Image (cartoon, rainbow, N blue to C red):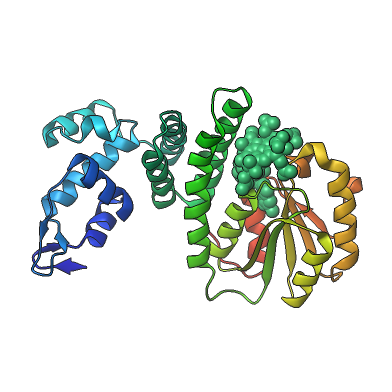
Amino acid sequence: MAVEGGYSIKAAALAAGLPVDTLRAWERRYGIVSARRDTAGHRVYSAADVVRLRRLRLAVERGHAIGKIAHLADSEIDRMLAERGPPLGPGAAADALADRIVAAASRFDAEACDQAVAMALALLPLPTAIESVFAPALREVGDRWHAGTFTIGQERLVSGPLRRRIGSLLDCCNGASTDASVVFVTLSGERHELGILMYATLAASRRVRVGYLGPDVPPVEIADFARKVGAAAVALSLVTTDALASELSQLAVLRAALDPATEIWIGGPAALAIPPSKLPPGTVRFTGPADFEARIALLGGTKG
Ligand code: B12
């Protein structure tokens, strides 16, 4: 939206390829541009501001810390961009963002963590953000916590913004959709929720109607809900490999209680550890976004 001879904050952020929150935070913390105010008091950005914001975004995507480059002249930033060769592809940008999330958590910098999560969602296709930024960042944080070098608080600095931002994306996408619905949930005792949250959001972004129940629900309750909403499938995340026996017996209870036409979709490390012969009939196991998106397309979802 253009405002009195310039760009509104929303338009400037869009044109620069940045989330609005990131633009606000950069402005507040580093004074990267100085937007004037219009008569109603709203910020107005000039075309030169947008060009500078875009330049800064490119430099950040190449791994430069915003705090170190915010005060450099445009010519200096251009020189850095030229020195580092052509723009990086999505793979390298994803690696840089995953590293940035972990580095921010290691400095206890909640705002930088949140910004990197927002940038991944704004700049990358959702399957790339899930598999190449969020999953590796969470695993790294988990491994460090396991090794005693990260605290629980640092893990929450990463999982908190992820839950919040992906959750609100799910709410935004989950509007007018296909008739087919998929229920996303975990079985009793399984508290690892982020796998189903991410894949529920991917399904909703492909216009499949999502029923999101979250973690830790008994199988009989899941089946009851799935019947009431006429679900085409129930998608489960099985993460804790130490609980395979309980997961298998809950899967059997779920299968018996569900409508026979309702499929059971499973993903996660424990799902991969179950021998196929032990899976109940009508169970589909997923290994990544490609097979998941193909199944979603069969329900009438759109292609990515
Ligand atoms: C965050 C976390 C937690 C959080 C979860 C918060 C939340 N709201 O989800 C909390 C603090 C609750 C937690 C608790 C516990 N945790 Co924990 N946790 C983790 C951690 C750090 C990250 C998990 C995560 O979110 N990973 C990222 C997601 C994206 O990965 P993912 O779940 O595998 O999902 C990916 C794929 O598998 C796939 N996918 C997953 N589900 C599905 C479903 C479908 C349909 C599809 C298509 C795809 C799909 O998509 C995702 C993207 O690639 C891991 C460390 C690690 N290395 O993973 C440990 C980890 C998973 N936890 C572990 C353990 C042991 C526990 C606890 C038992 C610890 C304790 N002693 O109390 C408890 C209780 C667990 C329980 N009963 O469920 C172990 C599991 C070990 C094992 N082999 O069983 C891990 C591996 C840590 C470790 N190294 O020991 N944990």
| Quarter of image, res 99 | top left
The answer to whether residue 262 is left or right of residue 20 is right
Q: Position of residue 106 (x, y in %)?
A: 45, 28
Near-viewer residue (61 or 72) = 72
- Point out residue 135 in the picture as x, y percentages from the top left corner: 57, 40
Asked whether, in this view, residue 15 is left or right of residue 204, the answer is left
Residue 261: where, in percent of width, then height?
83, 70
Within the image, what quadrant is residue 201 found in?
bottom right
Q: Is residue 171 visible?
A: yes
- The residue shown at (69%, 45%) is 287
Q: Is residue 274 visible?
A: no
Which residue is at the front of the view, 157 or 133?
157
Residue at 75%, 52% in the rendered image: 266
Vertical arrangement, residue 90 with respect to residue 292, above or below: above
Q: As drawn, is 231 to the left or to the right of 210? A: right
* Depth order, front residue of 235/124: 235
**Foreground residue, 17 or 155?**
155
- In the image: residue 54, left or right of residue 199: left
Q: Position of residue 217 (x, y in %)?
A: 75, 58
* x 82%, y 41%: residue: 243
Q: Is residue 60 above or below residue 52?
A: above
* Up-down relation of residue 60 to residue 304 (above or below): above
